[in-house]
Image (cartoon, rainbow, N blue to C red):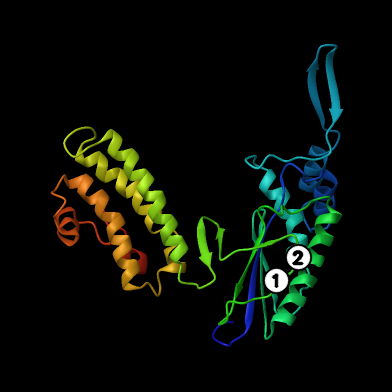
Amino acid sequence: MARSTKQHALVISLDIKGAFDHLEYNSIKNSLNNINFHSNTKETLIDLLSGRQVALNTPQGPATLPQHRGSPQDSCTGPAFWNLVANEVLTQSWTVGVHLQAFVDDFIFLIKAPTKAKVKSLANEALNQFKSWTAKHNLEFSADKSNYMHFSKNRNGPRWSAGIRRKSSIKYLGGFIDDKLNFATHLSELKSKTLILYQKIKSIAASNWGLNKNIRRKIYFTVIERILIYGAPSWANNITSRQQRLLNSIQRKFLLSITGAYSTTPTTALQVIEGITPPTYQSSNGIHSR
């Protein structure tokens, strides 16, 4: 929308450094006290975080240290505790033109303004407000994993020293978003990833030995196809003919592996023989062949 209205837009991706390992128990307790929740459950959770110790075996015998922070990311309560603390910054009041969203510990700012100077100003204000929240909870974002991307008709966007690198594409939730919004980077990465998988499959199953056809077909449906159409609703709406050919060429390698057909066999014929729909059709319609 910003590009169509000739506005400037920034996407700032922030990664919290060791978010779950540095999550302090006092922050969790304060967040629990601030929500309207059943008192017995709240007291149980607060008690769970109180008086915790780490036991260590030393040459002098067992030793204990008080534990004030740390919540395993793959634990049952870890994500819930993190969401309680993160919700504080997500529900803050942000300036018009600034939007913050997050998935676990990956935060994304979406900022738009009519001029480069204004979008830069809004970005600085948003980052300062965000840093106030991280400082309050003794957290910090990783400069190495934090990036920003600029969208506009003119690619010359604002630059500033905020400890964040500018990139032409950003990876978020397994997909790549580029500053042209044509998802060329995503498809290029998709090609590289599936090529590696194809080579690994080929090393254990050539055209006339190894895994049988049914197993190869199952591998395609359960692994390769899901990789090909992952996040398709976000990138396949305005897919170009060139991108369609690229997706078909990726699928073709696996079709040849499944069928054992000659390399000169047309892709469309392989799709018809196996009853496997083209990835472009699946991406656009959300239909899975089986």
Tell me the tag on residue 161: 2
Label 2 crowd bin: few (<14), some (14–19), many (20+), radius 10 Å: few
Question: Residue 213's spot in the image, x, y percent?
Answer: 20, 41
Query: Is residue 1 something that shows in the picture?
Result: no
- For the point 77% across and 70% down, the residue is 126
- For the point 78% across and 61% down, the residue is 88
Q: Nearer the viewer, residue 249 or 276?
A: 249
Question: Residue 5's spot in the image, x, y percent?
Answer: 58, 88
Question: Residue 51's spot in the image, x, y percent?
Answer: 86, 33
- Relative to 289, is 199 above or below? above
Q: Nearer the viewer, residue 86 or 148?
A: 148
Q: Quadrant of residue 116?
A: bottom right
Tell me the tag on residue 159: 1
Question: Residue 243's spot in the image, x, y percent?
Answer: 35, 67
- For the point 44% across and 66% down, the residue is 184
Query: Is residue 238 something that shows in the picture?
Result: yes
